[in-house]
Amino acid sequence: MMDLRELYQEVILDHGKNPRNHRFPEPHNREGRGYNPLCGDKVTLRLQLDGDKITDVGFMGQGCAISQASCSTMTQAIKGKTVGEADALFSKFHAMVMGEAGADDDFDSLGKLAVFAGVREFPMRVKCATLGWHTLNQALRNEGGEAKTE
Ligand code: ZN
């Protein structure tokens, strides 16, 4: 059994300090911006969508280690995925951090993202952990404006 709590600390520290895909991909054809007023986290996400596939993705942002680490692990998880697959991941991730019934059954399919299960005990932190995902949703729908966690 892996200790999720220990792994959580490790992933937040690692990805918070050295975020992956911390750059803007060129070319890109989608952009989303997100803001979490409760914590002050900001993120701009850009991605290249070829047909239905996310072929490249990167982000720049500032904020707490959880928001940055969550964006970082998200970009790793969705790169190469279809929009449908990314949507499905977001649904599972969201159910997990919200502590919804049955969500634990899907931990295995979330891979590294499963370490964020710990934030469910801290409602303020749930918004930090989901900011990147809300921003992704907005970028994929190309809705413009800013994704907010409120
Ligand atoms: Zn935060």
Image (cartoon, helix red, strand yellow):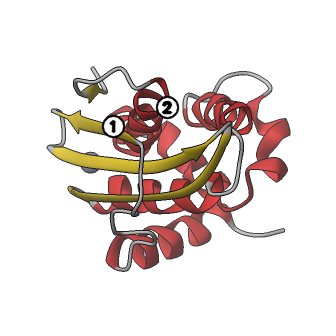
Question: Which residue is pictured at 31% across the width and 27% down the height?
Answer: 149
Question: Which residue is pictured at 40% across the width and 63% down the height?
Answer: 25
CB under 8 Å between discs 2 and 1? yes
- The Cα atoms of the two marked residues, 2 and 1, are separated by 8 Å
Vertical position of residue 4 compared to residue 122: above or below: below
Q: Position of residue 73 (x, y in %)?
A: 53, 61
SS class, disc 2: helix
Q: Position of residue 53 (x, y in %)?
A: 67, 44
Q: Quadrant of the C terminus?
A: top left
Quadrant for residue 62, please give it.
Answer: bottom left
Report whether 138 appears left or right of 60. Answer: right
Q: Position of residue 143 (x, y in %)?
A: 35, 20
Report whether 6 appears left or right of 32. Answer: right
Q: Residues within 10 Å of mark 1 (few under 14, many from 20)?
A: many
- Identify the amino acid type marked 2: Leu
Q: Dot 1 corresponds to which residue?
A: 32
Q: Dot 2 corresponds to which residue?
A: 140
Q: Quadrant of the N terminus?
A: bottom right
Q: Position of residue 137 (x, y in %)?
A: 48, 30
Residue 122 disc label: none
- Identify the amino acid type marked 1: Gly
Nearer-the-camera pick, 54 or 100: 54
Nearer-the-camera pick, 110 or 57: 57
Vertical position of residue 130 compared to residue 60: above or below: above
Question: Which residue is pictured at 34% across the width and 52% down the height?
Answer: 67
SS class, disc 1: strand
Question: Which residue is pictured at 45% across the width and 50% down the height?
Answer: 47
Going from N to C along the chain, the mark reached first, 2 or 1, is 1
Q: Residues within 10 Å of mark 2 (few under 14, many from 20)?
A: many
